[in-house]
Image (spheres, rainbow, N blue to C red):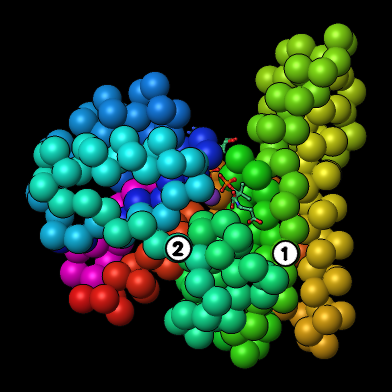
């Protein structure tokens, strides 16, 4: 059995590989304070994995805690994927390829398998990232913006007049503070995505496919006018691609 682990700035997403398919587990917070406890809670009952493939953007502390845990209970350290210049049919577009967030790199590897032609991937996580891949697997670069929760938190933190932001209203324009914040933050994300897709289409000479992933992908997809596909386990699928090539 292989274990696939995507360690983001908010949450650890993970899944086991059974019959070459991903069975996703319950995500848990990546915060260092609770990480060891969460690992024991979610992973102690698993069969011992022969291989562990991980991508981590939550800092070396998270990497150390997870490695210590898997060493202690399974006698096995994870293989931490690093961003490369070229692999699995994808050519990294960064001037310094190793500086591209490894979650973005792995999502491009998955996107390359999934898409028939040029495609864009949006990760609606702690940050919102947008990356472009042409029909030959060349990464044309991307964008990084704050994610939905981070935008809301920054409004609460840095203003006196915005406090309660719980809202189930779904009209575009809000008629109270919470609805105005919800709408503003969603419009910031969907506006970024729709403008970026148009810009990508200009560079590509053709309309790209659009794939969304991350904890807020469904909420963003519901507001987007552009056609898109939500793939919740996109990064785990990229890790599976890498795992297959090694075993
Ligand atoms: N059950 C949930 N628990 C926590 N966050 C959630 C949940 N469902 C959706 N979210 C949203 O998902 C975001 C984190 O998405 P995720 O893709 O896990 O981010 P990251 O990869 O940066 O850790 C949070 O900011 C939150 O808005
Ligand atoms: C952009 C990110 C913060 C996204 O992290 P996430 O929201 O997935 O937790 C991460 O991919 C990262 O730290 N990237 C390094 C900088 C870059 O990609 O240019
Ligand atoms: K992520």
In the image, farthest residue toward the top: 160
| Left or right placement of residue 199 versus residue 63 in this view | right
Task: State how many labels appear.
Answer: 2
- Indicate which disc residue 109 carries: none
* Quarter occupied by residue 172: top right
Q: Quadrant of the N terminus?
A: bottom left
Badge 1 density bin: few <14, some 14–19, many ≥20, Cα 10 Å? some
Q: CA distance from mark 1 to mark 2?
A: 18 Å
Give the crowd class for mark 2: few <14, some 14-19, many >=20 residues within 10 Å: some
Say if the magenta span includes residue 184. no
**Residue at x 29%, y 70% (from the top left corner):** 243
Q: Which residue is mark 1?
A: 142
| Quadrant of the frame with the C terminus | bottom left
Name of the residue lying farthest toward the front: 96
The structure residue drawn at horizontal position 37% and vertical position 43%, both measured from the top left corner, is 63
| Between discs 1 and 2, the one toward the N terminus | 2
Q: Residue at x 23, y 38 (%)?
A: 68
Q: Is residue 107 visible?
A: no
Residue 82 — which label?
Answer: 2
Residue at 89% from the left image edge and 23% from the top image edge: 175
Q: Contact (CB < 8 A) between labels 1 and 2?
A: no
Q: Which residues are magenta?
A: 13-23
Respond yes or no on whether mark 1 lies under 8 Å from ligand 2: yes
Vertical side of 144 occupied by 180: above or below: above
């Amino acid at each position: 059995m292989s274990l696939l682990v995507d360690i983001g700035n908010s949450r650890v997403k993970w899944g086991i590989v059974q019959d070459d398919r991903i069975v996703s587990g319950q995500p848990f917070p990546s915060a260092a304070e609770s990480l060891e406890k969460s690992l024991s809670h979610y992973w102690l009952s698993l069969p011992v994995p022969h291989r562990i493939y991980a991508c981590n953007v939550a800092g070396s502390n998270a990497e150390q805690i997870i490695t210590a845990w898997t060493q202690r209970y399974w006698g096995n350290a994870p293989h931490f994927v690093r961003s490369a210049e070229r692999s699995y049919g994808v050519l990294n577009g960064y001037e310094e390829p190793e500086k591209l967030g490894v979650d973005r790199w792995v999502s491009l590897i998955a996107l390359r398998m999934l898409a028939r032609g040029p495609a864009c991937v949006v990760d609606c996580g702690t940050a919102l990232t947008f990356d472009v891949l042409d029909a030959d697997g060349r990464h044309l670069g991307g964008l990084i913006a704050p994610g939905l929760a981070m935008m809301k938190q920054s409004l609460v933190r840095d203003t006196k007049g915005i406090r309660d932001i719980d809202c189930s209203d779904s009209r575009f324009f809000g008629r109270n503070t919470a609805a105005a914040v919800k709408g503003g933050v969603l419009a910031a994300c969907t506006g970024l995505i729709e403008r970026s897709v148009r810009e990508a289409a200009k560079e590509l000479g053709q309309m790209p496919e659009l794939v969304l992933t991350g904890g807020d992908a469904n909420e963003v997809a519901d507001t987007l006018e552009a056609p898109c596909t939500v793939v919740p386990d996109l990064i785990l699928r990229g890790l599976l691609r890498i795992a297959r090539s090694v075993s």
